[in-house]
Image: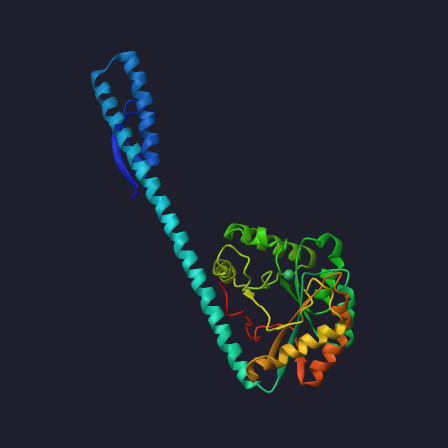
């Protein structure tokens, strides 16, 4: 005799091969119920064919109804299970994004505390967008000569040609951030999906070449750009959810101008920009925008004088870290 288990339910009796009555139990799952019912239908069909038994026919009808009910139950079961999975995924997403927000808030608070305790230290962040390029090695040589660290917001479009430069930036201890893969405004800012695809691409390229996973970002054109047809808040939200911090700048060297500025003009732009900042707090932490592009040779020429001038004004030239003020443009649309 088959023993009844706690998760089983008696279904019906059937004649065993040796002529005794054997209770058949089935698992309560709809799938097991269906399998068992189908098997019974099969057996009863054979019995009907050979014996035309009335009781077998009645049993067959009963089991057929049971199959129908099982089918309905299974559909309901599948749909409820799907609902539960979707709800669990939704809750997980909410939990992760609120954790990221809490971490960011904690980070912001601790950076403020550290900044308050070190207000006497003025910091300047040299940031280079759009590289690597044919100028990257010259920039790195100068930074090395002055023993200071820079911040490179790189793109990925020409990554095959500059693998050594990506590696050197990391090996020399500078900071590497993302500045999109394609740097094509039309492509990146087309939609949230397009932005995410480009972000994944540049993050992967950097990881693939250097083994380093970048966690900071600079929007092409800055977060206050006027070219994105989609609200920049959508893209900021994507970065937030992934724990990626974006930085704009508060001093512009002006070297993105379509004309090639002279070395003197670039130096003047930097120091005029710093003096033009509204408050002493703003002037305490300056993030200067430069471009690492092959044609911007005068940017490289201007660097030694800029580094010396900043140091003469008491600035420490620093790499971006967790305590860096989040210099972000206020006029984001
Ligand atoms: Zn750029």
Q: Front-most of 207 and 72?
A: 207
Quadrant into which the N terminus falls = top left
- In the image as oriented, which residue stretches furthest toward the front? 259
Point out residue 54 in the picture as x, y percentages from the top left corner.
21, 16
Point out residue 57 in the picture as x, y percentages from the top left corner.
23, 19
| Residue at x 55%, y 85% (from the top left corner) | 117
Q: In this view, does 74 lie above or below 144?
A: above
Point out residue 49 in the picture as x, y percentages from the top left corner.
30, 13
Colour scheme of the rendered structure: rainbow
- In the image as oriented, which residue stretches furthest toward the bottom? 120
Q: Front-most of 68 and 171?
A: 171
| Residue at x 69%, y 59% (from the top left corner) | 210
Question: Which of the 4 quarters of the picture holds residue 244?
Answer: bottom right
Q: Front-most of 99 and 169?
A: 169
Point out residue 229 in the picture as x, y percentages from the top left corner.
51, 54
* 61 displayed left or right of 172: left
Q: Is residue 228 above or below residue 301?
A: above
Q: Front-most of 151 and 9?
A: 151
State which image quarter holds ligand 1: bottom right
| Residue at x 39%, y 49% (from the top left corner) | 86
Residue 5 shows in this picture: yes
Count of numbered circles on the image = 0
Residue 1 shows in this picture: no
């Amino acid at each position: 005799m088959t023993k009844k288990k706690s998760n089983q339910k008696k279904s019906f009796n059937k004649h065993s091969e040796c002529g005794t009555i054997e209770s058949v139990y089935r698992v309560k799952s709809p799938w097991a119920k269906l399998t068992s019912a189908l098997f019974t239908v099969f057996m009863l069909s054979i019995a009907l064919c050979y014996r035309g038994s009335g009781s077998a026919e009645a049993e067959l009808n009963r089991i057929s109804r049971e199959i129908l009910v099982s089918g309905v139950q299974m559909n309901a079961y599948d749909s409820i299970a799907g609902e539960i999975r979707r709800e669990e995924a939704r809750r997980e997403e909410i939990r992760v994004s609120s954790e990221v927000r809490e971490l960011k808030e904690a980070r912001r608070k601790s950076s403020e505390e550290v900044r308050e305790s070190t207000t006497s230290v003025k910091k300047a962040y040299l940031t280079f967008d759009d590289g690597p390029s044919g100028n990257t090695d010259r920039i790195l040589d100068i930074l090395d000569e002055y023993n200071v660290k820079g911040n490179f917001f790189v793109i990925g479009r020409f990554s095959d040609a500059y693998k050594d430069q990506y590696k050197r930036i990391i090996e020399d201890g500078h900071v590497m951030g993302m500045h999109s893969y394609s740097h094509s405004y039309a492509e990146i800012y087309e939609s949230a999906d397009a932005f995410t695809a480009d972000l994944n691409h540049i993050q992967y390229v950097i990881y693939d070449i250097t083994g380093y996973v970048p966690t900071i970002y600079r929007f092409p054109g800055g977060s206050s750009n006027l070219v994105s047809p989609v609200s920049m808040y959508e893209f900021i939200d994507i970065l937030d959810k992934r724990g990626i911090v974006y930085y704009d700048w508060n001093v512009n060297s002006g070297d993105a101008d379509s004309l090639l500025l002279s070395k003197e003009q670039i130096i003047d732009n930097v120091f005029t920009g710093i003096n033009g900042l509204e408050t002493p707090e703003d002037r305490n932490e300056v993030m200067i925008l430069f471009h690492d592009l092959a044609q911007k040779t005068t940017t490289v020429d201007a660097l030694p004088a800029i580094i010396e001038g900043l140091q003469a004004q008491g600035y420490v030239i620093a790499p971006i870290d967790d305590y860096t003020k989040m210099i972000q443009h206020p006029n984001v649309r």
